[in-house]
Amino acid sequence: MNALDIALNIGVAAVTVAVVLCAWRLLRGPEMTDRLLALDTLYMNAVALIVLLGIRWNTALLFEAALLVAMLGFASTVALARYLSRGDVVE
Amino acid sequence: MHPLIEWSAAALIVIAAFFLLVGAIGLARLPDFFMRLHAPTKASTLGVGGVLLASMLVAFSQGRPGIAELLITLFVFVTAPVSANLMAQAALHLNLASRARVPDGAVPERRKG
């Protein structure tokens, strides 16, 4: 086992703990904006996890999936934030 | 793979994992929303950037150009402040409680109705 594999193990473990913490905030969050922020952070962590698994499995196919997850995360965050602050998504 | 590239990619991954973990701990532990907004929007963005930089290093060492990683990095670094700003606007609109006292005149008056 070389240095990159050990680092990948540490990275996947840390991102998993981060996902659990974000899910806790998503379920608990006292306000709607807390849940929105937790969802945005979950999207970020999903991108990081996909890229780490792409390095580990030595494939380039997963990066398009990571790009799609990042774009969907931004679009959904913008839509929900607009809904919370304006009352509708598109005026 | 060259050992220098491998070790630098491993160090980048460990640093990025630390920042992602710090962002999530801040999201879970800080007391009010405006403080919680700080932790993930900055630390997690840096963490994702570090992971993508390590992935680009590995891709270069294997002879791939790594365009997709560059695109993801640019996209995340451009959109993270925008979404954080929109979430802060939503929180201001909902008048969430803040521990810090907001200075007079910092928030523009909203028309009623």
Image: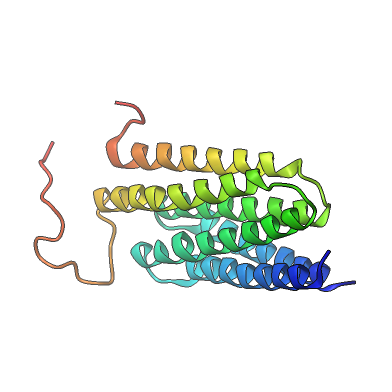
Q: Residue at x 52, y 67 (%)?
A: B23
- Name the quarter where the C terminus of chain A is drawn: top left
Residue B66 higher or lower than B34, as above or below: above
Q: How is the image coloured?
A: rainbow
Residue A56 or B106: which is nearer the viewer? A56
The residue furthest right is A1
| Residue drawn at x 61%, y 42% as measured from the top left | A67
Left or right for A79, reference A45: left
Give how far across and how far down residue B10 sits, in percent: 73, 70
On screen, residue A75 above or below B32: above
Q: How many marks?
A: 0
Where, by quadrant of the figure, is residue A63 drawn? top right
Q: Taking A12 as reference, is B41 left or right?
A: left
> B47 or A76: which is nearer to us?
B47
| Horizontal arrangement in the rendering, residue A52 relative to residue A78 (left or right) | right
- Residue B16: where, in percent of width, then height? 61, 67
Give the position of the N terminus of chain A as an image quadrant.
bottom right
Residue shown at the point (25%, 48%) measured from the top left: B93
Most extreme residue toward the top, as rendered? A91
Q: Position of residue B51 (x, y in %)?
A: 64, 60
The quadrant holding residue B103 is bottom left
Residue nearer the viewer, A67 or B58: B58
Residue B77: x, y in percent?
47, 53
Residue at position x 83%, y 52% in the image: A57
The picture quadrant where one finds residue A18 is bottom right
